[in-house]
Image (cartoon, rainbow, N blue to C red):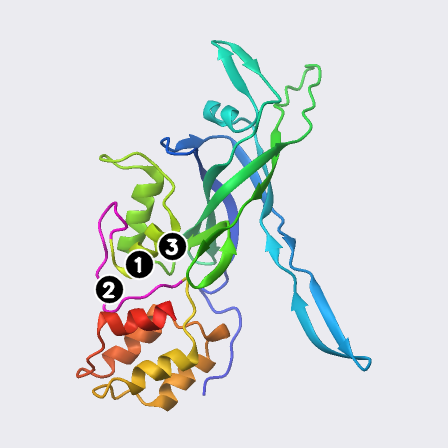
């Protein structure tokens, strides 16, 4: 066993910044959102709800959460007007207080450490079915100090459903743990490429890219085994697969050790690959792993 150590060089991580904002409206091409100052995420719900019996707390459950945030920016794309309750009646003439519409949004935050600084990595945040509510706009007289005003919008979102997780409107792509080929494919979809316009992919497309497919756009990836870092693989599911593979020499004890060492029994791609590589004769098929993932 190795004794724990703290503040190891290269492991002092932090997150900072926000950039690469992109607005997606229906089937239209995504457009860059310049001038974003901050995105303050403040989910609602999630409060603990205790349960008592005979005067003793016996359970503590968390209430469902909903995505909420406040976006602050110096400006917004002209395309945003159509979902922000504005209607262009003619060139230069706009009617406000119109019906608001849903839209998609992506933005990036940086991951830094004590060695590489803010260039260590990044996270791409994907938001679906977002609705923006206006906030106060304060216009002041100009004096010797010209201070640009900022605009802000309260964001709420309607969750989307998928296999293996509770409905959510917010997904995060981590550059540090996502396969480089899959990451490049996703960024070509999100930001556009020489052959396709920027768009917000469906969750099914994202899952297919992580699983080794091309998601209908861009190149695919060919990992040693199929995996999906977004889904949890339970201890029982892993044991079932191992027992069903007569050629696999991975002992049940080693599988349990991996599972116990991972919070919420999350089995990463690396863990699966370690098992497979440990037995050159293991005939673990793509279908077998897919069964685990889907379960």
From the image, tell me which residue sits under label 3.
175
Marks 1 and 3 close (CB-CB < 8 Å): no
Mark 1 Cα within 10 Å, few/some/many (few <14, many 20+)?
some
Residue shown at 36%/89% (left/top)?
Answer: 252
Q: Mark 2 points at which residue?
A: 223
Q: Which residue is drawn at 20% across and 82% down?
A: 282
Is there a contact, CB below 8 Å, between mark 2 and mark 1?
yes
Please name whichever residue, 37 or 191, is drawn nearer the observer in this view of the structure: 191
Residue at the spot 25% in from the left edge and 84% down from the top edge: 245
Question: Which residue is located at x 45 percent, y 53 percent?
Answer: 172
Q: What stretch is highlighted in magenta?
A: 214-229
Residue 16 counted in the magenta span: no
Q: Which of marks 2 and 1 is nearer the N terminus?
A: 1
Asked if 198 appears above or below 223 in the picture, the reply is above
The label shown at residue 179 is 1
Foreground mark, 2 or 1?
2
Q: Is mark 1 on a helix, strand or loop?
A: loop
Quarter of image, res 73: top right
Q: Examine the rendering and report whether any part of residue 117 can be seen.
A: no
Q: In which quarter of the image is residue 269?
A: bottom left
- How far apart are the two marked residues, 2 and 3, measured between alpha carbons? 16 Å
Q: Which residue is most to the right?
A: 55
**Looking at the image, can residue 212 be seen?**
yes
**Is residue 219 toward the left or the right of residue 190 in the image?**
left
Q: Position of residue 246 (x, y in %)?
A: 22, 88
26 w.r.t. 17: above or below: above
Q: Work out how far the residue at label 1 is from the one at label 3, CA to CA, in angstroms.
A: 8 Å
Q: Position of residue 140 (x, y in %)?
A: 71, 18
Q: Is the magenta stretch mostly helix, strand or loop?
A: loop
Disc 2 or 3, which lies upstream in sequence? 3
Within 10 Å of disc 3 (Cα), the crowding (few <14, some 14-19, many 20+) is some
């Amino acid at each position: 066993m190795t004794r724990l150590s703290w503040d190891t060089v290269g492991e002092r991580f932090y997150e900072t910044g926000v950039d690469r904002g992109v607005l997606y409206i229906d089937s239209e091409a995504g457009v860059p959102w310049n001038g974003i100052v901050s995105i303050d995420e403040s989910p609602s719900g999630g409060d603990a709800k205790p349960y008592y019996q005979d005067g003793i707390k016996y359970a503590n459950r968390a209430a469902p959460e909903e995505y909420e945030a406040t976006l602050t920016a110096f400006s917004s794309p002209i395309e945003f007007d159509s979902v922000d309750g504005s209607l262009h009646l003619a060139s230069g003439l706009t009617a406000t207080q119109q019906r608001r519409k849903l839209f998609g949004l992506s933005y990036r935050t940086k991951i830094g450490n004590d060695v590489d600084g803010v260039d260590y990595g990044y996270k791409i945040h994907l938001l679906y079915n977002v609705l923006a509510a206006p906030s106060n706009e304060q216009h002041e007289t100009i004096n010797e100090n010209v201070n640009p005003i900022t605009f802000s919008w309260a964001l709420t979102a309607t969750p989307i459903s998928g296999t293996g997780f509770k409905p959510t409107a917010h997904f995060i792509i981590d550059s540090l743990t996502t396969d480089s080929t899959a990451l490049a494919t996703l960024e070509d979809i999100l930001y556009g490429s020489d052959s396709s316009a920027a768009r917000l992919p469906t969750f099914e497309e994202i899952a297919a890219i992580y699983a080794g497919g091309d998601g209908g756009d861009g190149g695919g990836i060919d990992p040693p085994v199929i995996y999906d870092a977004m889904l949890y693989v339970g201890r029982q599911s892993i044991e079932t697969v191992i027992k069903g593979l007569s050629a696999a020499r991975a002992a049940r004890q080693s599988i349990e050790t991996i599972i116990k060492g991972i919070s919420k029994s999350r089995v990463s791609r690396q863990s699966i690959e370690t098992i497979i590589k440990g037995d050159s004769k293991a005939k673990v098929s793509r279908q077998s792993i897919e069964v685990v993932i889907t379960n």
